[in-house]
Amino acid sequence: MALTITCPICGKRNGYEFRYGGEEKGPRPDEKDLTPESWCDYVHMNKCVAGVQQEWWFHRDGCGSWFTIFRDTTTNLEKETPEAKE
Amino acid sequence: MFSKSKPMWGKKTKLKSSYDVVLIGGGLHSLATAYYLAKEHGITDIAIIEKNYIGYGGAGRNTAIVRANQRTQYNVPLYKEALDLWPVLTKELDYNLMFNNCGNLNLMHSEAAMNAARMTIATAQFHGVESHLIDAKEAKELVPALNISEDITFPIHGAMFHPPGGVVRHDAVVWGLAKGAAKMGVEIHQQTEATGINTKNGKVTAVVTDKGVINTKQVLISAGGYSAALIHGFLGIKLPISVLTIQAMVTQPLKPILDHVVSSGAYHCYANQTLKGEIATGAHMDPWPNYTTLNTAHYIKHQAEALSEFLPALRGIRFMRIWGGLADMTPDMAPIMDGNEQVEGFFMDCGWGYFGFKSCSAVGRHMASFMATNTCPDILKPFALKRYQEHKLMGETAALMSYTPDN
């Protein structure tokens, strides 16, 4: 099982250089009208997609960039776009 | 395995168009729930729906270790009950589950860890679970293969010794429970994939499968690592779960050298010797969600390094088999058991991470009671999904396990 991640600055690198940063959940909810439900949803809740998902990565042992990629969680392969097929 | 011949648990049945209860997932939590629904509540019109075969997932991939030395007052009684049930189930099912209570030795590699162990031990003792703190020399007496020299990466300061824990043959539990449940009328449908849950006015009405629609008022999803994706896919309910691949392996068979389950948090490694002589070892997870169940070279190296430090007799021994399974991790390392809350008639039992095997017997019993009476047993109440919203996280780990930026 190999994992490579394409960093926008450093290019395609070994996956162990990176730290997974969670599913992409959209912008942080506005503090106005924030409810325990909406905050919990943002902080904890995941879709756990078995397939292609958009997710955050942090180039921990590299340039320090934060960025999102699309990855198929059933194969560990990066995808160009969410619709991309094998 | 799927031939026309009779399955090992009884006769092959045709999928009916309706059941009182449908359980999605053919793992230990479903099998145990079905068994206790039939045995203790007289509900036998049950279908277990399994996409592959029973025991395909975590039930057949875990490393068979059982113990009741968890950290919190909510978890310990549940695991204690599960531990106490192995000999009972062996008798009841008339099936040898090969329970070997050889004892667990949880190594501590710093004074801070020793202090943490003191607290965990106090919790265990308060709940009537045998657990002691021992020093490095005593650990060496119990497990002579242990390296207690100070000349390793994480020198051993002592250990948490939990004599009633040990190993149970996981496949035997699958087969025993399947037989026991089928004997009372539970139907097991392998090669049947659940593809949806129909609801009407906030109530469950049916489970959709690739073999047809099954009308039912009650459905449980306890599909191990696949639960979170199914629950979101079927009902749009998001869960605080990250699904990771956890890896394990066995070495070539050796003469008896290890008669305890030894584990180390600092080395991220545990090991025990199977009855065949292999050293079964594991613990590592690559820290990004995936459903691959594949192994990594990174991990094989890690495991070899760890074992050759604290069990140096294993240097040069070869790994013989290696495999992976799924662990559905929650931030507080405690499971989610809930029902009739989001949708009437919908129950879930998931988020077990790598504790699903140890807990299956007791949890099946309590989930059965929950489903039969529509009343949540007190012991399961703290595990409701709402705890995350109310910020009543369980504290099973001292620090949150989050596969998100803060970790």
Image: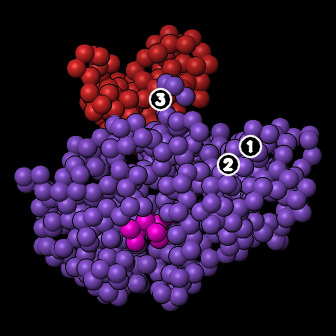
Residue B335 versus residue B259 in the image, above or below:
above
Marks 2 and 1 close (CB-CB < 8 Å):
yes
- For residue A40: magenta? no
Q: Quadrant of the N terminus of chain B?
A: bottom left
Question: Total of numbered circles in the picture?
Answer: 3
Residue B115 — which label?
Answer: 1
Q: Give left or right: position of B151 versus B298.
A: right
Q: Secondary structure at mark 2?
A: helix
Q: Quadrant of the C terminus of chain B?
A: top right
Label 3 CA crowd tier, 10 Å (few <14, some 14–19, many 20+)? some
How far, Cα to Cα, is label 3 from label 2?
A: 28 Å
Marks 3 and 1 close (CB-CB < 8 Å):
no
Among the two numbered marks 3 and 1 on one chain, the one whose residue lies closer to the N terminus: 1
Residue B180 appearing in the image: yes
Write down the colour of chain A.
red
Q: Amino acid at mark 3?
A: Thr
Residue B351 image point, x, y percent? 42, 50
Q: What residue did someone put label 2 on?
A: B119
Q: What residue did someone put label 3 on?
A: B404
Chain corresponding to purple in the figure: B
Question: For this rendering, which residue is in front, B316 or B381?
Answer: B381
Label 1 CA crowd tier, 10 Å (few <14, some 14–19, many 20+)? few
Among the two numbered marks 3 and 2 on one chain, the one whose residue lies closer to the N terminus: 2
Give the main secondary structure of the magenta stretch. Answer: helix
Residue A84 appearing in the image: no
Residue numbers of the magenta segment: B358-366
Residue A26 versus residue B114 in the image, above or below:
above
Which chain's residue wears label 1? B
How far, Cα to Cα, is label 2 from label 1?
A: 7 Å
Q: Give left or right: position of B59 versus B2.
A: right
Q: Amino acid at mark 1?
A: Asn
How far, Cα to Cα, is label 3 from label 1?
A: 28 Å
